[in-house]
Image: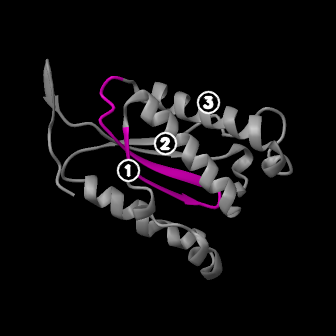
């Protein structure tokens, strides 16, 4: 990955973010490939609406990692709230039957999140961690069914 500075009318720079979010009660809802695919699709859809670039997405059975670029117009809490809020609403609105046995009430995501801003030197390292580090969370059979990071690069 070549890290290039983003040029805007009044600034030049780079904004990379590693964001990890977990379902409520740390439930393993992403074992179901369709739940994983739909959730990722809603996360990416919201990011595109916000005009931020999700460079990579990967998940374990009970969490999702996002590598986000070009987010300078938003605070980290706003990004997390927007992505989690939209994907939660869409999953509950249209797919409650898929997650209702593990997630109840109106909750899809846990209230917290992990974040780390990433500079040019570390961006490739984080992307590699997201792609390769998730293997420990899946059985061999589940790993074969899971799409890899390269399937989500937009």
Image disc number at residue 154:
1
Query: Where residue 102 sits in the image (x, y, percent)?
Result: 81, 51
Q: In which quarter of the image is residue 2?
A: bottom left
Image disc number at residue 44:
2
Q: Is residue 96 above or below residue 144?
A: above
Q: Which of marks 3 and 1 is in front?
A: 1
Q: In which quarter of the image is residue 143?
A: bottom right
Q: Magenta segment range?
A: 53-73
Q: What element carries label 1?
A: loop
Residue at image position (84%, 40%) is 104
Name which of mark 2 and mark 1 comes first in the sequence.
Answer: 2
Query: Where residue 154 sits in the image (x, y, percent)?
Result: 38, 50
Contact between labelled residues 1 and 2, with CB atoms less than 8 Å apart: yes
- The rendered magenta stretch, by its main secondary structure, is classed as strand
Q: Which residue bears the numbered disc 3?
A: 85
Q: Is mark 2 on a helix, strand or loop?
A: helix
Query: Where residue 106 sits in the image (x, y, percent)?
Result: 79, 32
């Amino acid at each position: 990955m070549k890290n290039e500075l983003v040029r805007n009318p009044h600034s030049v720079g780079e904004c990379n973010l590693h964001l990890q979010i977990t379902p409520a009660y740390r439930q393993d809802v992403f074992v179901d490939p369709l739940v994983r695919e739909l959730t990722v699709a809603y996360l990416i859809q919201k990011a595109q609406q916000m005009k931020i670039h999700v460079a990579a997405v990967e998940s374990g059975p009970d969490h999702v990692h996002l590598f986000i670029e070009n987010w300078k117009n938003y605070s980290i809490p706003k990004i997390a709230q927007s992505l989690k809020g939209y994907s939660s609403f869409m999953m509950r609105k249209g797919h409650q039957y898929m997650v209702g046995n593990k997630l109840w009430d109106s909750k899809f995501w846990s209230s917290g999140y992990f974040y780390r801003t990433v500079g040019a030197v570390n961006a490739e390292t984080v992307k590699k961690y997201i792609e390769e580090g998730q293997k420990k969370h899946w059985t061999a059979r589940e790993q074969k069914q899971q799409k890899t990071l390269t399937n989500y690069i937009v």
